[in-house]
Amino acid sequence: MAVAFAAAIAALVPLLTSSEFHLHLAIVMCLNLLAVNGLFIISRSGQLSLCHAAFMGLSAYVCAIAGKMLGLPFLAACSLGVVSGVALAFLLGKVVLRLKGVYFVLITFVFGEIFRLLVLEAEHFTGGASGITGIQPARIFGLLLDSKPAFFYAALILAAGSASLAVWLFQTATGQAINSVGDNPDLAEATGISVRKVQLFCFTLGSSMASLSGAFMASYTGYISPESFNMNASILLLLMMVIGGRKSIIGPLVGTLFITLLPEFLRGAVKTQNMFYGIVLIVILRFLPDGLASFRQRLRAQRDGNRKSHG
Amino acid sequence: MQIEYLLVQSLINGLVVGMLYLLMAIGFTLAFGVMRIVNFAHGECYMLGAFAAYVCVTRLGMPFLAAIVLIAFAGVAFGWLIESAVLSPFRQDELSAMIVTLGLAMILQNLALLIFGAEPLFIPAIAEGVISVGSVVVPKARLYVVAISLVILVLLYGFLRHTKHGRALRATVQDAEIASAYGINPRIVYPLGFGLGVALAIVAGGLMAPIFSVSPFIGTGPMVKAFIVVILGGLGSIPGAAVASISLGLAESLGSTFFKTTSVDIGIFVAVMAVLVFRPDGLLGSAHK
């Protein structure tokens, strides 16, 4: 319901602004939201992934190469990208999900770095450090998405779809199993839930959402390089989730909105922008550990607390 | 003869990088052991150390050894300050603390970028000339680095073994609750543990500055290696870190004599995955918990 409402409002964006740049921001935001929702699902199962951008990258590269070298149409190339993301997430997850907590974070971080090196190394296919240019624009069922408004609607559908998927998922029995695994894995295991299976499911699903986002990102920008998907990109996605709130379903939305729009208010401070991200991150974790999405609850709790102490 | 020469040469290079990884990994694992905090700013501390050495040597004209001693103490103070000012509210929540260090890393890297710019800087070599044994030639500068690293590790060992605060640190690593029940003050031990960890990264950066170049982006590589070392050796385990980092340094150096560096890095990652599958408790069997 809320998702439909938010999507309806967002759908008006192209009518409200004629600025190409605003539309560009909206598109980037939608594609980021798709990826961050995936990260959110992984995080709900109790694991923080720091190689999320690597899955975006894998799929972006597969999609771009399939389009350029094999001449596949966009939809087929994009599907190929997502399938390879799913396959890699499943195989990688099988191995690295043995690790818990900080060990998992470390190994995913290392994997993200290795992915970057692999792309640099496979120069013949990936163009090495100079990347791939001239990637085909998205075309879905004969509809060419080469203008910004057209692409925006496609991105919006993806973003809204990913949010609906998350909302729906956490209302099902599977969603409850995911929550219980995230809250207390030992207890979940004792009640007959397979922690490994649930986490593998979340890791594969979440990473597939990153893959989808990556394939669209590649066709939107038309250019990809190893640095588009390095560890800073993964960290930025994590930042969006944490700043928004990693416990609340609207956290990813709030976080992507905040991080995408923040540079707009910091114009002329490009150099200090990343420093500012770092400071915001620390301040929010200190004073709003459950992210911006918890701000209203926090206010309410404080008001109730005041009432109690006065009454 | 040719191949022998290559092998010995790369063994020595491997030892030098292994030492670097060891300093990084011990600092990382010490901070983790004491505070349960994964410090993602560890690589940026390495980078700061390199810049500190650069400023001390080229701008202030200090001798290299004096600069290293100075930045070691400054490093402890810096880590102490970060712990008590930024990290202390997150002592109960290791994931939040880890994300906070990601924020710290962003701040430190961009601060360095702002002050020094992105162009790589260089420090003159700390020693001229080579020592040759038979046909094997070793630059003196690299030998000095290994020697200084060894001295630092021996000092650290002595501190952890034989002083009151060192013992308090080790007790906290083993069991924080029991340690505090025996009257060990967390307000000293936590900043001290983190400060020592940071200082080791900073010293590693300072030591490597004359060998490699200095720029705001040099921290990531050594940090990734430190991560690999602690995954292989087990977080919080110093003997594990020692075995893992020297093997990693040697494997890398030997590998890159025959293959491309990136191929070696990828091979090492595959090996790490294999270790995770077949020996999930790390090479020495210290448990992953």
Image (spheres, rainbow, N blue to C red):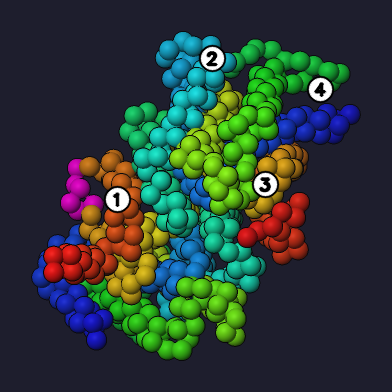
Closest to the observer, B21 or B268:
B21
> SS of the residue at dot 2?
helix
Q: Closest to the observer: B166 or A287?
A: B166
Contact flag, marks 2 and 3 (Cβ < 8 Å): no
- Chain at numbered mark 4: B
- Badges 4 and 1: C-beta atoms under 8 Å apart? no
Q: Where is residue A90 in the image (x, y as percent from the top left)?
A: 59, 74
What separation in Å lies between label 2 and label 3 (alpha carbons)? 30 Å
Q: What's under tag 2, amino acid-wise?
A: Ala
What residue does disc 3 label? B237
Please, what is the three-letter code of the amino acid marked with disc 4? Answer: Val
What SS does tag 4 mark?
Answer: strand
Which residue is located at x 43 percent, y 31 percent? Answer: B78
State how far apart marks 3 and 1 are (Cα).
Answer: 32 Å
Q: Is residue A186 left or right of residue B153?
A: left
Residue at numbered disc 2: B66
Q: Residues within 10 Å of mark 4 (few under 14, many from 20)?
A: some
Vertical comparison of B123 with A11: above or below: above
Residue beneath label 4, please?
A: B136
Q: Assess whether mark 1 and mark 2 are in contact (beta carbons under 8 angstroms).
A: no
Q: Are marks 2 and 3 on the same chain?
A: yes
